[in-house]
Image (tube, rainbow, N blue to C red):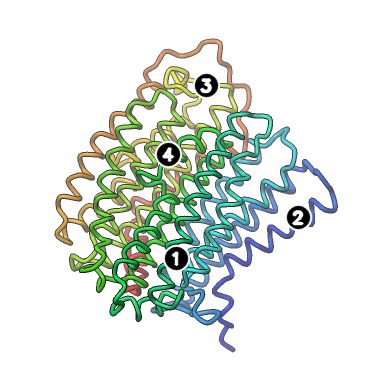
């Protein structure tokens, strides 16, 4: 059997892009079509195809080791890029399934699904970026689609305002990132990560290099909603259609992390730490992001905003994967960060989709509004219980194992104090995650609330996310192996 061409490694991104074109064709043939089944079905088929393609390439071994290098080193397909493509395609599939009901009665649905597909393709390309140029272009593909998706509810002033704020902050962060990239190019004479790595060590321009590295770090911190670049997240998540809040808080955040993993380990490396200590910068960023995110979440009365701020705190945990590098357990700690992002993709997406389900029933967004929901929708509330306890690190979902092994890897690397800060923050998060459970299971029920219908797509997406979150407990060992192997290829 003849070997497959290298471009097959990009099958996940190609499947998503081709499906977006098909959706555009449908919209051209039937302008402003509101055939929800056709549009959602086509999009779901594309995301499942991307998921299957990522799994097939991963299992085939054609991208094992250092992976496939494409287009003169601009892109690389390896275990890490495929691992994250699985996360992106899974989140996009859940969001598409939930959007089938959420978009009932909305116009321009074809544009919505096409933007979701293109944003996901941008995430997959980010995971494969091996050059600062392709990373920036992929960032913009993801960002521009995201700005439009946040403003999709055009008649809702909150949605439009959130999108405008997101766009303005995003434009500034893109400028900072691009300026940082230009400084790196000026110092090293290259944009491909391998070229940067070769020339960054002996450069006499350490001052410019330091400024460039910090500006690139700032651009990635915006995309991952890390403090102090997190202010856009609660506004955008609250104003956006709730399935898009789930999409951004899980998929977009993971995309920011995967490119940060590759840039800082491959392009910059540890050799420049005596001049530019980026590991120390990530340690400060991790501690501040965990603490600020969790304290802010504890003060919220709106469940959606609480989830938005808690996602900032969760970003702080993943930052440990970069903050604990250099301690001798680099592949392990980076692999555990990747594993946490995979679990987070299901439990956090599921939590936001539960909020979308509750909105569909006409329930408000405050903790008080959630009172007694458990007696009216026990299955959905049981799923929410799984998400909350898993996010808090209680062993009802795989979030316990992903946090436990991430903190353990930090201890193994000698950064016990980072793990200690993570444990204290996890204990704090118990307050606001269990507050949701107290409301839905112990609060006073709204007797006037009658649940007359169970939206098939939304309900299925919530239950499916909960089932996967639980199933990842026994299957967690199958996740960590490929993650650590993929991380090992970077060192």
Q: Which labelled disc corresponds to residue 278?
A: none
Q: Which residue appears at 67% of the width and 49% of the height?
A: 113
Residue receiving disc 1: 181
Residue lying at the far bottom of the rendered structure? 2
Does label 1 or label 3 sit earlier along the sequence? 1
State which mark lies toward you, 2 or 4. Answer: 4
> In the picture, residue 381 is in which quadrant?
top left
Report, in whole angstroms, how far the alpha carbon at label 3 lies from the one at label 2: 35 Å
Report, in whole angstroms, how far the alpha carbon at label 1 lies from the one at label 3: 44 Å
Q: Which residue appears at 66% of the width and 41% of the height?
A: 100
Q: Which residue appears at 27% of the width and 39% of the height?
A: 291
Report, in whole angstroms, how far the alpha carbon at label 4 lies from the one at label 3: 23 Å
The reply to whether the C-beta atoms of the residues labelled 1 and 3 are less than 8 Å apart is: no
Establish if 322 lies above or below 8: above
Depth check: 95 or 114 in front?
A: 114
Does label 2 or label 4 sit earlier along the sequence? 2
Q: In the picture provided, is 402 more to the left or to the right than 249?
A: left
Are there few (<14), some (14-19), or many (20+) residues within 10 Å of tag 3?
A: some
Could you say whether the residue bearing mark 2 is in a helix, strand or loop? helix
Q: Position of residue 424 (x, y in %)?
A: 20, 39
Establish if 357 lies above or below 120: above
Report, in whole angstroms, how far the alpha carbon at label 1 lies from the one at label 2: 34 Å
Depth check: 365 or 61 in front?
A: 365
Q: Position of residue 439 (x, y in %)?
A: 39, 21
State which mark lies toward you, 4 or 3. Answer: 4
Residue receiving disc 3: 364
Does label 1 or label 2 sit earlier along the sequence? 2
Residue receiving disc 2: 24
Q: Which labelled disc corresponds to residue 231?
A: 4
For the question of whether residue 459 can be seen, the reply is: no
Does label 4 or label 1 sit earlier along the sequence? 1
Report, in whole angstroms, how far the alpha carbon at label 4 lies from the one at label 1: 23 Å
């Amino acid at each position: 059997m003849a070997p497959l061409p290298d471009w097959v490694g990009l099958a996940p991104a190609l499947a998503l892009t081709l499906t977006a074109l098909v959706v555009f064709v449908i919209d051209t043939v039937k302008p402003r079509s509101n055939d929800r089944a056709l549009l959602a079905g086509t999009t779901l088929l594309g995301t499942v195809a991307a998921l299957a393609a990522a799994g097939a390439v991963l299992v085939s071994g054609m991208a094992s080791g250092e992976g496939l290098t494409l287009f003169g080193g601009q892109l690389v397909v390896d275990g890490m890029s495929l691992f994250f493509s699985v996360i992106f395609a899974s989140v996009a599939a859940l969001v598409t399934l939930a959007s089938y009901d959420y978009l009932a009665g909305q116009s321009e649905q074809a544009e919505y699904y096409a933007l979701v597909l293109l944003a996901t393709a941008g995430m997959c390309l980010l995971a494969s970026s091996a050059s600062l140029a392709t990373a920036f272009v992929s960032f913009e593909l993801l960002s521009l689609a995201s700005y439009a998706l946040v403003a999709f509810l055009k008649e809702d002033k909150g949605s439009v305002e959130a999108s405008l704020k997101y766009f303005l902050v995003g434009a500034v962060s893109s400028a900072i990132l691009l300026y940082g990239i230009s400084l790196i190019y000026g110092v090293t004479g290259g944009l491909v990560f391998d070229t940067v790595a070769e020339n960054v060590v002996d450069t006499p321009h350490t001052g410019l290099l330091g400024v460039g590295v910090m500006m690139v770090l700032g651009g990635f911190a915006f995309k991952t909603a890390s403090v102090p670049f997190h202010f856009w997240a609660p506004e955008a998540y609250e104003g956006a259609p709730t399935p898009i809040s789930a999409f951004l808080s899980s998929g977009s955040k993971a995309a920011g992390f995967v490119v940060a993993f590759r840039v800082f380990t491959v392009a910059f490396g540890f050799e420049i730490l005596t001049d530019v200590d980026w590991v120390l910068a990530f340690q400060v960023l991790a501690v501040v992001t965990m603490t600020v995110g969790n304290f802010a979440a504890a003060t919220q009365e709106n469940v959606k905003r609480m989830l938005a701020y808690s996602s900032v705190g969760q970003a702080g945990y993943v930052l440990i994967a970069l903050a604990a590098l250099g301690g001798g357990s680099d592949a392990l700690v980076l692999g555990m960060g990747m594993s946490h992002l995979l679990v987070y993709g299901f439990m956090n997406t599921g939590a936001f989709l539960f909020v979308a389900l509750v909105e569909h029933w006409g329930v408000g967004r405050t903790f008080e509004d959630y009172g007694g929901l458990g007696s009216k929708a026990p299955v959905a509330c049981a799923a929410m219980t799984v998400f909350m306890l898993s996010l808090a690190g209680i062993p009802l979902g795989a979030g316990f194992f992903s946090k436990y092994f991430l903190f353990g890897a930090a201890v193994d690397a000698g950064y016990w104090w980072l793990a200690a800060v993570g444990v204290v923050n996890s204990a704090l998060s118990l307050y606001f995650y269990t507050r949701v459970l107290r409301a839905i299971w112990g609060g006073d029920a709204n007797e006037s609330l009658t649940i007359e219908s169970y939206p098939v797509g939304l309900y299925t997406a919530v239950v499916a996310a909960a089932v996967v979150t639980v199933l990842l407990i026994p299957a967690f060992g199958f996740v960590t192996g490929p993650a650590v192997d993929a991380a090992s290829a970077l060192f």
